[in-house]
Image (tube, rainbow, N blue to C red):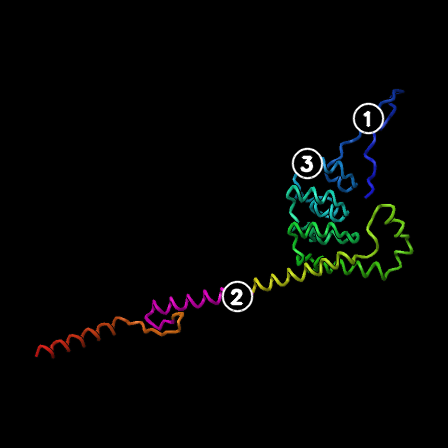
Amino acid sequence: MSQPEANEPETVTLAGVRMTCPPPEVSFWDALVRCQSEKAAEYIKGGIDVDELGGPYGSTPLGWAAFMGDESLVALLLERSANPSLPARKGSYPLHMAVWSGDNIKVVEALLAAGAKADARNRKEETALDVARFFEKLERDSDVEKTYGMDEWRERYSRPPLGRPKAIAVLEVATRAAEEATMAGAKEGAAKEKTDAGMDADDSAADEGGPVKEEGGVMEEAVDDEDAQLMAEMEAGDEADEAD
């Protein structure tokens, strides 16, 4: 991506004296928003909080770098343990933001490899795949591309080509796998709850002196105090008869 030039020193004249003023200090988020990757990288390497929310959308630095398609910054942030599953204040995750501005396939793959959840949903209950498909259709069906010369804009600012076919293909596979894993986890959890409920019922029955089912399917009758007393009396009677 083309980078705008850094702020230049400003020359002013005061009372007939020409003075050169140093450029104002650019903050971390100013550098990110202005696409000053080198300056932003300095802050990151200097130990700035890589999960600090900020910018126009209230996103993480990773989310904004993903939106801008800045592969080097995305890689650096992930190297510094930026959280790929932390949403912006307005609800979108870095993976959603990666498909906003084009077919940023390398950014999408980097986020997924770092553990971004493909089935994560924004406030509109949309996955990154849903968002990618929306913009794909919007760009290909709209006259905006031709009317405003978007091809020229893409070339000038090194933006990805029209559409998001590569990102969509990768996200389809990742989203399907994530949804299947979620379903498998839900089934496993339900089975565990059922097993735990059965064990609790068996324990309760044993405590109350009722029937107890064991794993082998054998039914054992729990003996209560009255049955024990009756059996003792019967045994005593048998012993008396033998003595007679």
Q: CA distance from mark 2 to mark 1?
A: 68 Å
Which residue corresponds to the image point at 74% horizontal and 50% vertical from the top-left?
106
Badge number at residue 79: none
Q: Position of residue 186 (x, y in %)?
A: 56, 63
Instruction: Decide: is 98 above or below 206.
Output: above
Q: Is residue 217 left or right of residue 32?
A: left
Inspect the image, locate mark 3, and give the three-letter code of the amino acid beneath it. Answer: Lys
Q: Secondary structure at mark 3?
A: helix
Type of amino acid under label 2: Ala
Looking at the picture, tell me which residue is in the foreground, 64 or 71. Answer: 71
Quadrant into which the N terminus falls: top right
Q: Position of residue 221 (x, y in %)?
A: 32, 74
10 Å crowding of disc 3: few (<14), some (14-19), many (20+): few
Q: For mark 3, what is the residue?
A: 45
The magenta region covers 187-213
Q: Secondary structure at mark 1?
A: strand
Q: Residue furthest left?
A: 244
Q: Which residue is mark 2?
A: 190
Other-residue count near label 2 (Cα within 10 Å), few / some / many at <14 / 14–19 / ≥20 = few
Task: Label 2: state its secondary structure.
Answer: helix
Judged left or right of residue 243, residue 80 is: right
Give the number of the mark in front: 3 or 1.
3
Q: Is residue 72 above or below residue 237?
A: above
